[in-house]
Amino acid sequence: MKPPALRAASPLAALLLQAALFVSCVTTDPFIPVDEFADTENFSQAAAALEERQKTIYRDKDRVLYCLDKGLLAHYAGDYEASSALLEEGERAIEENFAVSISQEIGTILVSDRSREYDGEDYEDIYLNAFNALNYYRRGNMDEALVEIRRMNNKLRNLSVKYGTIMTNMQKLALENNTELPQNSGAPLKFNNSALARYLGMLFYRGAGLPDDARIDQQQLQIAMAGAPSVYPHPPPSSVMEELAVPPDLARLNVIGFAGRSPVKKEEVIRVPLGINWIKIALPVMSPRNSQVVSIKVVFDSGESFTLELLENIGAVITATFEQRKSLIYTRSILRASVKGISAAVFNALEESSDENAWVFSLLSLGTQVFAEASEKADLRGGRYFPNKAYVGGITLRPGVYSFSIIYYDGHGRVLAARRHENIPLRANTLNLMEEVCLK
């Protein structure tokens, strides 16, 4: 049954209702200039455009998002030192804001999620370490690169217990307000191991001359993929088993190709009956951004070539990790909307029991419904420039200087992007890692 229309006590009230529902319908996306540069791989200009529009795009409560977005654009632009500084600042802010969110959870239950300090999504907190590890590798600091990978793995292991305290608080509040929790809201997260993290760990340990540690991560990569078939429905890349069998007198070239853009949040509205009224619940849901990239190939001037294989569907990981938090958002939204709905129901009851002041209570009832309708909005904040998929591959060659291209293709075999690498020295007994990105 569809919810009844909100009752209007007068033409003025009806106009107020229409105005409240119309406000914010017309908006201009402030990211358009930034995205236009990112679409054409002008990442330095994209980062500069983001900086110019910082105060327009981000509020003070969105510092984490600014650090993530600009940190990733700086990484793609090759400004690895600036990227590290931004990603590390973002990570610190995530930790601080999350600690505050736990301590204040009950006291701020009626506050809109969007009014809080943004404490990052799990996937943002996880993947920032992967890109910072690549930053440190590019800066020639393998030790710090490995620190970032270990931090990423630790966060993954803690995902299933991260929200224990918050969920306990939500369950208590739900009981106090006679509100039913969503099904499986307390179910532990099954994703706790990343093939991308293990792949980078394997390469970095091999490059640092730690074969036993590299072998452990090689095994963990296979375990990660086997243990989460919904996230990894594909087999491990065939090149993975070759990585620790490189003859000491030969060189190994490894390539990581990032493609597409990660999902973004969209608003989903549902309505729940409360007496004669309905309460609005606005929830964020992950919406994929389709990528044109279907395959990535590395082609040498000598004629040799190899195709990169899918390692990690980052978009699938994002969707899986968001489900745990979504349950908390749903519970919080139900409780908040219920309080708003109860206020309208009280005024309705007073209207029906009063003759002289019925019109006053009618207006108050309508006002609370209009406020609930207009104020209940999903928090759609999130990082915009994480890639959607990670492809990997490798080839063993004689040490020397090589020129090659990394080419991105669409489903019709057309070239979407081509990255030229001239006179690249490939050395034995070291890590020769190339990385490219195409956000199309």
Image: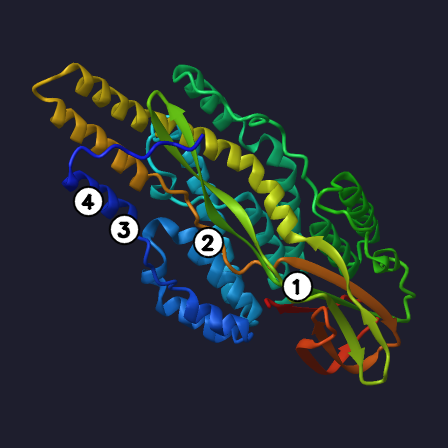
| Label 2, label 1: how far apart the Cα atoms are | 24 Å
N-term mark: 3 or 2: 3
Residue 41's tag is: none
> In the image, which disc is placed on residue 89?
2
Whichever of callouts 3 and 1 sits on the residue coming sooner in the sequence is 3
- Residue 208 horizontal/vertical position (percent): 75, 59
State which tag comes first along the sequence, 3 or 4.
4
- The answer to whether mark 3 and mark 4 are in CB contact below 8 A is no
Front residue of 300 and 274: 274
Q: Quadrant of residue 397?
A: bottom right
Amino acid type at circle 4 is: Leu
Helix, strand or loop at label 2? It is helix
Judge left or right: residue 304 versus residue 422.
right
Question: What residue did someone put label 1 on?
Answer: 258
Instruction: State left or right for residue 1 relative to residue 396.
Output: left
Q: Quadrant of residue 130?
A: bottom right
Label 1 secondary element: strand
Identified at 32% across, 35% down, the residue is 5
Disc 3 secondary structure class: loop
> Horizontally, is 190 left or right of 60 in the view?
right
Q: Which residue is mark 3?
A: 23
Q: Nearer the viewer, mark 2 or mark 1?
A: 1
Within 10 Å of disc 2 (Cα), the crowding (few <14, some 14-19, many 20+) is: some
Measured Cα–Cα span from mark 3 to mark 1: 39 Å
Residue 366 percent location from the top left of the image:
22, 32
Residue type at the position of mark 2: Glu
Q: Which mark is residue 15?
A: 4
The N terminus sits in image quarter? top left
